[in-house]
Amino acid sequence: MEILNTQSNRRSFIKSVAVSGGGFILGFSWLANAKGATGAESGEQIEINAYLRIGSDGTITIQAPNPEFGQGVKTSLPMIVAEELDVDWESVVVEQALFNMDLYTRQFAGGSQSVRAGWNGLRRAGATARHMLKQAAADQWGVSFDEVATGDGRLLHAKSDRSLGYGEVAAKAAKVAVPENPILKNPEDFKIVSSTKKNVDGKDIVTGKPLFGVDVDHEGMLIASIVKPPAFGMRLKSFDAASAREMPGVVDVIQIKTFEDDYQRRIFDDNAFPDLVVVVGETTWQTFAAKKVLKVEWEAFDDTEITLGTWGGGSRAAVIPGGLESTSDHEEKLAKLDEEAGGVARKDGEPEAAFDAASQVLDRTYSAPYLAHNAMEPQNFFADVRGDKIVVEGPLQAPQFIEQTVSERLGVPIENIEIRMTRMGGGFGRRAYCHYVVEAALISQRMKRPIKLVYTREDDMTFGIYRPAYRMRYRAAIDENKKVTGFHIRAAGIPESPLHANRFPAGAYENYLAESSSIQSNITTGAFRAPRSNFNCAAEQCFLDELAETVGKDPIALRLELLQRAKNTPVGDRNDYDAERYAGVLELVREKSDWGKAKPGVGRGVAAYFCHNSYVAHVVDVVMNQGRPVVERVCSAVDCGIVVNRGAAINMVEGAVVDGIGCALFGEMTIKEGVPQKNNFHQYRMIRSSEAPKRIDVHFVKNEIDPTGLGEPPFPPVFAALANALYQATGKRLYRQPFVDQLET
Amino acid sequence: MAEFVVKVNGRNRSLEVDPATPLLWVLRDHLKLVGTKYGCGMGQCGTCTVHLGDTAIRSCQFPISAVGDQPVTTIEGLSEEGTHPLQKAWIEHDVAQCGYCQAGQIMSAAALLKRNPNPDDSQIEGAMEGNLCRCGTYLRIKEAIRNANA
Ligand code: FES
Ligand code: FES
C-alpha cells in the first residue's frame, strides 16, 4: 500500500492480490476534495474506489464503481484506467461494481464529480498495473525494467524481439512490489482518452435487456405500490382496506412509517410523506388497480419539529411548517422579498453610494417555478429482507447515505446490507433522495417476502423533491457616461436561495452587493441538475444581456471586458472562477457561431456560465414560426479540461441543451392548497422531438487541464441563451419561467 | 380472468389474465419481456411502444382482450441478434444516455420505416412526437433514423 500526498490533498491507496488460477487484481481507492451535489460550497469529500483484474488468459476487467444514469461513467472511468494500462480498448470488459463500503468506500453520482474525483486515482491504478507487469516481464527475460515497453496489452523487448501478453505474466506481476511512483503517460500520447468509445451497454439497451431497476425480477417476488397523502401538509389519519383487499391479486394492504417520529434525518432523507399505505399484490397492474379503490382519510398537520443531519455529521433542529400551501401565496411572499434587504452574502466597495449617485438604474426581477425531475423510469426498488439480512436492488445515486438509514430504520447492521446498483433510467438529482429504498425494505420485512416497490408516474411526479422555486432581483447603477458603477443582487428561494455570491460578475465590479433570503415550506425540494446554478445563471445572464443593450455594448464584448477586469485587477479575493477560462469559452463560441453575422429574421442570444468546475457558453439561434419558437441551431463552447470520451461528452452537451430548452419553455410544477397540479405528462409538458433544436454544434477548448464535470455545466446557460435569443426574435424580454405562455399568442 | 393466446415475437403464448389488463403489463409481468417499458401508463410518453401487426401502439393503453390474433412484436423480437438496421444505427450513433426510452423510440421508428422507408425530417418528427426522452437524445435519434438504411 502506498500513500501519496499532493497539494490537492489527494490520497491514493493501491493494493495487489494474486487470484487463484493465475492473474491478479489491483484494488485501488482515492480520496479527492470534491464538491457535493447539494451545493458547491458544502465541500463534501467524495471517495471512489474500484479494481481492475487481469486474468491469466489476458482478459482485462475493469470495475466501474459509480452508479450510471446516462452520464456515461460506466464507459469513461474505465477508459482512463485502460489508457494508462496501455491496452486495446476492445479487450476490456467493464463491470458495474457492487456497492461495497469495504472494497469501494464511497460511490456516488452527483455534482458532476465522478470523472473529476476519479482522474488521478484511475490513472495511477492503470499505470501501477502496467509498471508491475513490466517488472514481471523484465524479471522473466532477465533484462532491465527500462528495456521493456508496452503496446496494446503486450509487453515488448525490442532488442531480443520478444513479447508477452499481459495475461502470461499476470500471476508473477501480482508478486511485484507496488511501485511508489509509477510513470504516467504524457497526455500527448493518449490513445483511448480523448477518443470516442461507444457506450458499453449500447447493445443491451437497443435489444431490450433487463438493465434497469424496474426490470428486476426474483423468485417469489411480489409487487408493492404506495398510497400517499394527496397534498403536502397532510398526513395519514386512517384507512379502510376492505374493498382493496377484495381486488384480484391483492395479497395485503399494510401501513409503513419510513421514519420513526424521533428519527434524526440524514442528508438526502428529505421526504414529505413518511407515513404510507401500501398495497401488495401479485402483479403490477393488479396492485395499481387496487390502489384506486382504497379508502384513505388524511388530515392536515401543524408545525412539526424534526432533527436534520448536516454535512460533516452534525445536526440541527428544524420545523416543517404546517398548512396547505399554494403557488400563488409563494409568489406573493417571494415578491415581497424584492423590497426587503436579505442576509448579506458579499459586499464590495460602496454599492449604496453608487446607486444614490446613478443617473440611471436598470432594475429587473426574474423568477422560476418548482420543477419535477421526471426521469423516464419512475421510482422503484427491489428488497428482500430475511431476518437480519437485507438485499436491495435498483436505481439510486447515493447508496452510501441510504445504507445508513436502512440500517438504522430496520435495525440491521450495515455489513448485513447488500446494495446492488442497476442502471438508472435517468436521475438528474432525484435519485439521490432514496426514501423508496427504505420503503421497499420495510415492506419486505413486514411481508416476509421479496418485493419490488413500483411507483406510478403519478406517485413519482407528486412526491415532491422538486427543484426549489426561485426569484432574483438584479440592479445596475449606471452613470451619465453609460458606465456601470454598482451591481446589486437580491436572491430568494423556497426553501433555499439560488445565490452564488462569489461567481462572475462578482470580482468585476468595484461596488457590489449580494443578498440572500429564503422562505420555509413543507414542499420538499432537492438537487436538480446543477442545483441553484440552473436559475442563478438564467437570471444573471439575461440581466447582463439587457445591461449590455442599455449601455450600448455587444453582449459578448461586455462580458469579455468584465472578465478582463476580473483577471487583471480582481475585486475581492473570494472570486470563484477563472476569468481566463471563462473568457476562453466566450471567445470560442463567438468564433464558431459567426457571432455578429446572424441571418435576418433569426434571433440570436448568448450566455455563459461556470459551475461544477467547468465553463460553458452557448449561442442559440431561434426563429418564430406562427407563434412557436423553432431553435435552428445551438453552438456550444465547453472547457471541461481534457475530454475523456469525446462522443459521449458531445452527447451529454446535446442532452443538456435539449433539456434546458424544454425546462425553460415548458417546465413548471404548481401547487394549490398543498396539491401538486400536475401528475402526469398530459399536464406536465416536456420537450418533444419536433421542439428540439435542429442542430447542435459542440466545441471543446483544447487544453491539458485535468478533466472536470460535464453532466451539469452545459445545462444552466441554456435558459438565458434561449431567452436572449427570443428577445431578439420577438422584441419581448422574458423574466418569468417557463416562457411558453408568454410566446404563444 | 379469462384465457388468451397471444402471438408475441413469433411464438404463441397462452395465459390467464383479467381481460382489461394492458398489453404492457402482460408483456412485462406475465411473459417477462421487460424491454418494453412503463413510463406514464396513459399514452403520453411512448416508452411502452410495441408493434401490433405493422403498427406502433402504446401497449399501456391496449387491453389484452383487444389483441386478438394480430401478432405482437416487442424490442426483444425486432431482430434475432439485435441486427435490425435501426438497432445497428442506434449503436453506431451512440444514441442512448440513460437508455430507458430507447426501446420505445426504436419501435416507433421501426413502424415508421416499414410504412415509409425514406421519411423526410418532418415525417420523422411526426412519427416520433409521442416518444419522450428526458435525457434529450432527440437529435441522435433522428440522425440514426435517417441513416438506418444508408
Ligand atoms: S407508458 Fe405507455 S405511453 Fe407512457
Ligand atoms: S435516453 Fe434517457 S430518457 Fe431517453
Image (cartoon, coloured by chain):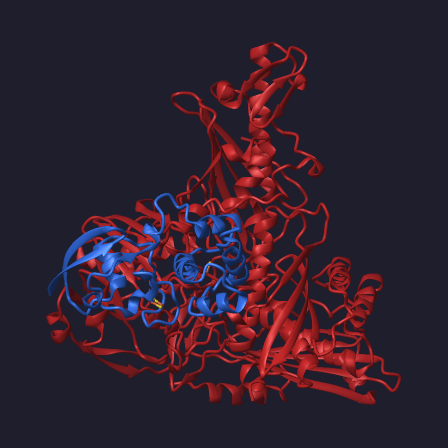
Q: Position of residue A79 (x, y in %)?
A: 56, 40
Vertical position of residue A662 compared to residue A438: above or below: below
Place of residue A577 in the rendered image (x, y in percent of width and height, measured from the top left): 71, 61
Farthest residue, direction right:
A481
Q: Which residue is found at the position 28% from the left and 61% from the top?
A: A453
In the depicted structure, whether residue A670 falls above or below residue A381: below
Per the rendering, the colour in which chain B appears is blue
Residue A537, by quadrant, is: bottom right
A620 to the left or right of B41: right
Chain A: give its colour.
Answer: red
- Residue A550, by quadrant, is bottom right
For the point 26% across and 66% down, the residue is A225
Name the quarter where the N terminus of chain B is drawn. bottom left
Residue B81 % position (x, y): 37, 43
Residue A675: % across, % down:
37, 82
Position of residue A287 in the picture relative to residue A607 (left or right): left
Q: How many labels does the image show?
A: 0
- Side of A475 relative to A694 (left or right): right
In the picture provided, is A732 more to the left or to the right than A299? right
Toward which corner of the image does residue A134 lie, by quadrant? top right
Asked if residue A43 shows in the view, the reply is: no
Between A693 and A293, the one lying in front of the other is A693
Q: Can residue A733 be seen in this view?
A: yes
Viewer-nearest residue: A458 or A357 = A458
